Image (tube, helix red, strand yellow):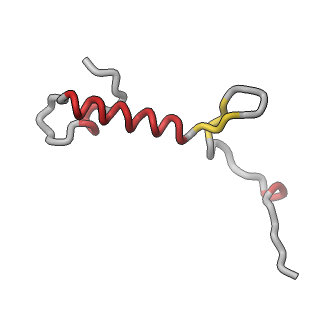
Amino acid sequence: MTKLKNPDKADLNNDKELSSYEENRGMAIEKAMRKQNRVKLNGGGFVAKGCGAVMNDKKKVTTIS
C-alpha cells in the first residue's frame, strides 16, 4: 500500500505493481511538487503560488526613458 496520490503515474513499466524504486521516485516527485508550489510568508504560514488573478491596477509597469 502506497501513500502516493497518483500511483498510476509512478508505475513506469505499466505492470500495475509498484517496485520500491517506482514508489520512492513517485514520493520524491510529489514532495518536490508540493514544495515548489508553496512560498513561505514573513509572518509564518504558506501561500500557494499562482492562486488568484492579478488585478490590472496592481500590475508592475516598467517604462524606458
Q: Which of 12 and 55 is in front in this view?
A: 12
Residue 7 lies left or right of residue 52; in this view the side is: left
Find residue 29 and report its horizontal and vertical position in percent: 38, 38
Q: How many labels does the image show?
A: 0
Q: In this view, does 9 lie above or below 60?
A: above
Residue shown at the point (78%, 28%) measured from the top left: 43
Hey, which quadrant is residue 32 in on the image?
Answer: top left
Residue 44 lies left or right of residue 13; in this view the side is: right
Residue 43 lies left or right of residue 6; in this view the side is: right
From this viewpoint, which residue is outermost toward the bottom?
A: 65
Q: Which of 46 and 24 is in front in this view?
A: 24
Residue shown at the point (84%, 57%) measured from the top left: 57
Residue shown at the point (34%, 21%) measured from the top left: 3
Hey, which quadrant is residue 41 in on the image?
Answer: top right
Image quarter in which the C terminus is found:
bottom right
Q: In this view, does 7 lie above or below 58?
A: above
Image quarter in which the N terminus is found:
top left
Hey, which quadrant is residue 39 in on the image?
Answer: top right
Find residue 12 and report its horizontal and vertical position in percent: 20, 41
From this viewpoint, which residue is outermost toward the top?
A: 1
From this viewpoint, which residue is outermost toward the right?
A: 65
Residue shown at the point (17%, 29%) measured from the top left: 19
